[in-house]
Image: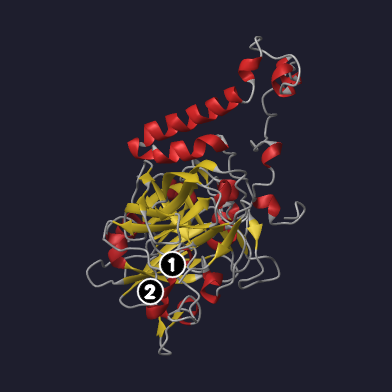
C-alpha cells in the first residue's frame, strides 16, 4: 500500500509474531491446556528458536558485534536533560510519533460547504474510551464554539411554567457521570451496497464512547412543573444552523437515563461535540443526542420534524419506511486484525475488537477464524457497562493460510448479531441506517487484511 496515501496514515500494523516457525505446530497442539499454558508455550517456543539459532554459540552473554544498536548504544534521551512541563496555557498532545492516529473525513454523506463527518480510528485505539480529540464527528450545519455565558436552555410545552436555565444554573444541580457509546445511525451504511471501504475506521468509525457528566433531564422537567402523566414525548432542539430537532419518548426520560451533559472525559464538552450543552440519550442513534441544546418541549405525541420525516428513516423491501427506529441494536467489530493492517509472520496474535448494544450490556462475543464455520467465545474485558463499548480479546495462532475473521455479539436481552443474509431477509438491500450485520476481514497469505462481505 502507498505509504503516502490518506488511508495508510490511519493504520497501525498488528504486532509482530513472537513465535519461531518451528514452534508454531507444537504450541497450537498444546493450546488446549489453557490460556496460561498457551502463552507460556508460545514464549518458550520463541526462546527455543532463538537459542537454537546461535545464542548458545557465544560465551559472552552480551554480544559486542552484530547486536541491536538500540540496545548496545545509550540513546540521547538517557544522557541528557529532557523537556520541562508544558508551558502555561498549553493543552497536552500525543507523541509526534502517533500523529497518524487521527480522525478521517468522508465525502460519502450529506455535505454542507464543509466536510460533515469524521471517523474515529478504531483500529488504533485501546480499551473502551475514545479520546476526546479522536471522537467521531457528524455535523448538519458545521460546528460552533458558543459563548457559554450567553447560551440558554428553555423548558416549555406541557409544563406549569416555562423555565430558562443558564449553564451556571444547570451546573449547580445534582450531577451524574456515566460511560456510554454514541453511534451514528448511518454507521456502516456503505456496507449495505457491498462497498468494501478499506479499514475499520471507515466501516465502523462513526461510533465513540466517553464518560459524560451532566444533569438528568427529568430533573429539569420537574423543576418546570412538567405534566408527566399526560406528556408522552419531548422535542429536543439544537442551536446550530440546521435547528436539529428530534422526538424523544418520555418513557426513556422518566427512567433517569437521559441527561443534559456539559462534561466529557473529565473536561467540558469540545465545541465539535456540542459545547456547552448536549443531550445524552443512551442506546439511541447519535442524531438524537442533540448538540448545542437550547430547548426541550414536552408534548403528547411525536413531532414528526424534518429530521424524522425525511432523514433517518429505513426503506423496507415492501416500499414502506420505518420511522423513529432509534435503538442501536447489538453489534461488534474486530479491530485487530482488520482492513489495512498487515500480519508480519505466522504465529500468535491477540484478536481484539469492540461490541455494544443499545438495549443494555453485552453478554457474549464469539469469534470465528474460518469464515463463520466454527466459533470460539472471546474474553470480555472489564468494565462491561450498559450501553457502552465492551472490549473483547481472543488468543489466536495464525498458520499463514488465508482465512476470514469475524465477530458475533449477543446482548443481555438474548439478541444475536445477524449475518448479512439474515439482515437483508428482513430489511432488504435499499437501507442506509442501522446496519448491524457481522463484519468480515480476509487475512491473505501475505498477511495483508482486506474487507470482504460474507452472506
Quadrant of the rendered image containing residue 436: bottom left
The total of numbered circles placed on residues is 2
Where does residue 288 sit, x and y in percent of width and height?
A: 45, 66
**Quarter of the rendering containing residue 146:** bottom right
Q: Residue at x 56, y 34 (%)?
A: 20
Q: Within 10 angstroms of label 1, few (less than 14), some, or many (20 or more) residues?
A: many
Looking at this view, name the residue that lies furthest to the top: 60
Determine whether the residue tagged by mark 2 lies in a helix, strand or loop: helix
Whether residue 74 is situated above or below residue 25 in the rendered picture: above
Q: Residue at x 57, y 62 (%)?
A: 451
Name the quarter where the N terminus is drawn: bottom right
Q: Residue furthest left?
A: 229
* Mark 2 in CB contact with mark 1 (< 8 angstroms): yes
In this rendered view, identify the residue nearer to me: 382 or 184.
382
Drawn side of residue 94 relative to residue 174, left or right? right
Quadrant occupied by the C terminus: bottom left
Badge number at residue 197:
none
Colouring method of the image: secondary structure
Relative image position of residue 148 (x, y in whole percent)? 56, 51
Mark 2 and mark 1 lie on one chain; the one further toward the N terminus is 2
Q: Position of residue 410 (x, y in %)?
A: 33, 58
Residue 422's disc number:
2
Mark 2 surroundings: few (<14), some (14-19) or many (≥20) residues within 10 A? few
Q: Secondary structure at mark 1?
A: loop
Q: What residue is shown at x 22% (from left), y 69% (from top)?
A: 229
Question: Can residue 301 be seen from the camera position used here?
Answer: yes
- 414 or 374, which is in the foreground? 374
Position of residue 252 relative to residue 73, above or below, is below
Image position, residue 209 (x, y; %): 47, 51
* Side of 223 where 38 appears, left or right: right
At 52% from the left edge and 51% from the top edge, which residue is drawn? 335
Disc number for residue 437: 1
Amino acid at each position: 500500500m502507498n505509504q503516502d496515501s490518506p488511508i495508510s496514515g490511519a493504520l497501525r500494523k498488528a504486532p509482530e509474531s513472537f513465535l519461531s516457525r518451528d514452534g508454531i505446530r507444537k504450541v497450537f497442539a498444546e493450546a488446549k491446556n489453557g490460556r496460561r499454558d498457551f502463552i507460556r508455550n508460545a514464549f518458550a517456543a520463541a526462546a527455543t528458536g532463538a537459542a537454537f539459532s546461535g545464542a548458545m554459540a557465544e560465551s559472552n552473554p552480551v554480544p559486542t558485534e552484530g547486536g541491536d544498536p538500540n540496545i548496545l548504544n545509550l540513546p540521547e534521551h538517557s544522557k541528557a536533560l529532557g523537556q520541562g512541563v508544558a508551558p502555561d496555557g498549553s493543552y497536552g498532545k500525543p507523541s509526534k510519533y502517533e500523529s497518524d492516529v487521527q480522525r478521517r473525513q468522508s465525502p460519502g454523506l450529506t455535505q454542507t460547504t464543509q466536510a460533515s463527518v469524521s471517523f474515529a480510528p478504531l483500529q488504533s485505539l485501546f480499551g473502551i474510551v475514545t479520546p476526546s480529540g479522536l471522537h467521531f464527528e457528524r455535523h448538519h450545519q458545521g460546528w460552533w464554539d458558543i459563548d457559554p455565558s450567553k447560551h440558554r436552555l428553555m423548558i416549555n410545552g406541557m409544563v406549569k411554567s416555562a423555565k430558562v436555565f443558564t449553564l451556571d444554573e444547570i451546573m449547580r444541580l445534582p450531577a451524574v457521570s456515566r460511560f456510554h457509546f454514541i453511534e451514528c445511525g448511518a454507521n456502516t451504511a456503505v456496507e449495505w451496497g457491498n462497498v468494501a471501504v478499506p479499514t475499520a475506521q471507515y466501516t465502523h468509525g462513526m461510533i465513540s464512547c466517553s464518560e459524560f457528566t451532566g444533569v438528568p433531564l427529568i430533573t429539569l422537567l420537574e423543576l418546570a412543573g412538567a405534566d408527566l402523566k399526560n406528556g408522552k414525548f419531548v422535542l429536543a432542539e439544537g442551536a446550530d444552523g440546521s435547528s436539529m430537532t428530534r422526538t424523544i419518548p418520555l418513557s426513556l426520560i422518566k427512567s433517569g437515563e437521559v441527561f443534559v451533559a456539559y462534561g466529557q472525559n473529565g473536561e467540558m464538552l469540545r465545541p465539535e461535540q456540542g459545547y456547552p450543552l448536549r443531550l445524552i440519550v443512551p442506546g439511541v442513534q447519535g442524531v438524537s443526542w442533540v448538540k448545542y441544546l437550547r430547548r426541550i418541549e414536552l408534548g403528547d405525541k411525536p413531532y414528526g420534524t424534518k429530521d424524522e420525516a425525511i432523514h433517518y428513516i429505513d426503506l423496507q423491501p415492501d416500499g414502506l419506511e420505518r420511522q423513529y427506529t432509534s435503538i442501536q441494536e447489538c453489534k461488534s467489530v474486530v479491530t485487530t486484525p482488520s482492513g489495512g493492517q498487515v500480519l508480519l509472520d505466522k504465529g500468535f496474535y491477540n484478536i481484539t475488537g469492540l461490541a455494544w448494544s443499545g438495549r443494555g450490556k453485552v453478554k457474549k462475543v464469539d469469534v470465528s477464524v474460518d469464515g463463520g464455520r466454527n466459533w470460539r467465545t472471546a474474553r470480555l474485558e472489564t468494565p462491561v457497562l450498559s450501553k457502552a463499548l465492551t472490549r473483547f480479546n481472543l488468543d489466536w495462532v495464525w498458520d499463514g493460510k488465508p482465512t476470514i475473521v469475524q465477530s458475533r455479539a449477543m446482548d443481555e436481552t438474548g439478541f444475536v448479531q445477524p449475518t448479512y443474509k439474515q439482515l437483508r431477509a428482513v430489511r432488504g438491500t435499499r437501507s442506509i441506517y442501522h446496519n448491524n450485520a457481522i463484519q468480515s476481514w480476509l487475512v491473505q497469505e501475505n498477511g495483508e487484511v482486506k474487507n470482504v462481505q460474507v452472506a
